[in-house]
Image (cartoon, rainbow, N blue to C red):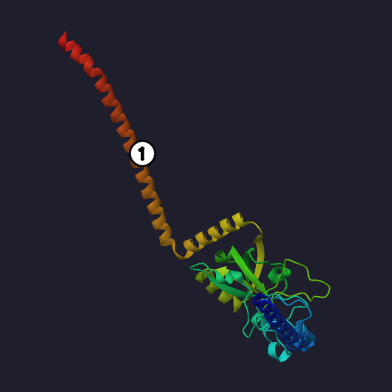
Amino acid sequence: MTRSEVMKLNNRFIFGILSLVLAAVIAFVALPTIARQTNGKTEIVRITQPVLKGEKITSDNAEVVEVGGYNLPSNVAHSMEDVEGLYVTADLAAGDYILTSKVSTVPVSSDVALNDIPSGKVAISLTVKTLASGLSDKLQPGDIIRIYHFLETAEEVPELRFVKVLSVTDSDGINVDNTKEPTEDEEPQQSATITVLASPEQARIITEMENDGVAHVALISRNNDQLAEELLAEQDRTLQEIYFPETLVEENAESQDGGEAAEGAADGEATGEAGSENTEGGAETAPADDGQDAA
């Protein structure tokens, strides 16, 4: 047997030993570990009915079930004590496992509009004291409404003729979605407050109305962005006339000055054109005069 054949035989022997060791590791270590993880059971908390962002986890919408422990997320909740009473930070569907990253100990606001209040404006809520005063639970975010004040008689408030609705909430502070009809299994939500976008002057009036009489709203516009913009601009103009009339005088003066300046510029251009025409005319007649002198 040659030396090369001996080396090949040794290599095959070593390879065979390594294969046997690897097979033993797989058989006695890896496979039992995988089997334990696959067959092992653990308890987790699972959603039983849809839970919307901002709602609480309760025994009515969640339950503890036993499932296989293999490949479960590390942050899955294992007991109701871990999550009951917490607020969900995203919409959850029936059958979803509750992850600790999807719950919060503080209430979660789903009002996107409240995150982008324009400079000089505030968000303020008014109470819906009767079903009729809140448009019979038909208001939606983005609506343009008129707010009447009823004490002994109903009065139109000039400062509140056109106001934009930001959100409608129930008595628990949960947003009311009046864009869809509740299903047979759902209990209808009743509007308790209306949050609107207002100027500081409007907010003061709404605060006074909360403590003196009843606010009654009427729908003016919906799903018409151009009309809504025009109405809100008209309301801003009314507020300016009531509270800041001096700014209107300044604006009118500036506009008049601008108009006079424009007229002056136009007159200057007309005069310049006339002068240019006269100059051209003189230049044309000059050679004729030279000719006469020469004659």
Quadrant of residue 71 in the image?
Answer: bottom right
Nearer to the camera, 244 or 75 = 75
What is the quadrant of the N terminus in the image?
A: bottom right
Q: Residues within 10 Å of mark 1 (few under 14, many from 20)?
A: few
Q: Which residue is mark 1?
A: 266
Q: Is residue 228 above or below residue 151?
A: above
Q: Residue 288 appears at what percent x and percent y?
A: 23, 14
Quadrant of residue 45 in the image?
Answer: bottom right
What is the quadrant of the C terminus in the image?
A: top left
Residue under the image location 38 percent in, 49 percent down: 256
Q: Is residue 149 visible?
A: yes
Q: Residue 72 appears at what percent x and percent y?
A: 72, 82
| Amino acid at circle 1 | Ala
Nearer to the camera, 258 or 130 = 258
Q: Residue 96 appears at what percent x and percent y?
A: 75, 78
Nearer to the camera, 35 or 223 = 35
Is 141 placed left or right of 66 in the picture?
A: left
Is 103 placed left or right of 255 in the picture?
A: right
Residue under the image location 61 percent in, 69 percent down: 166
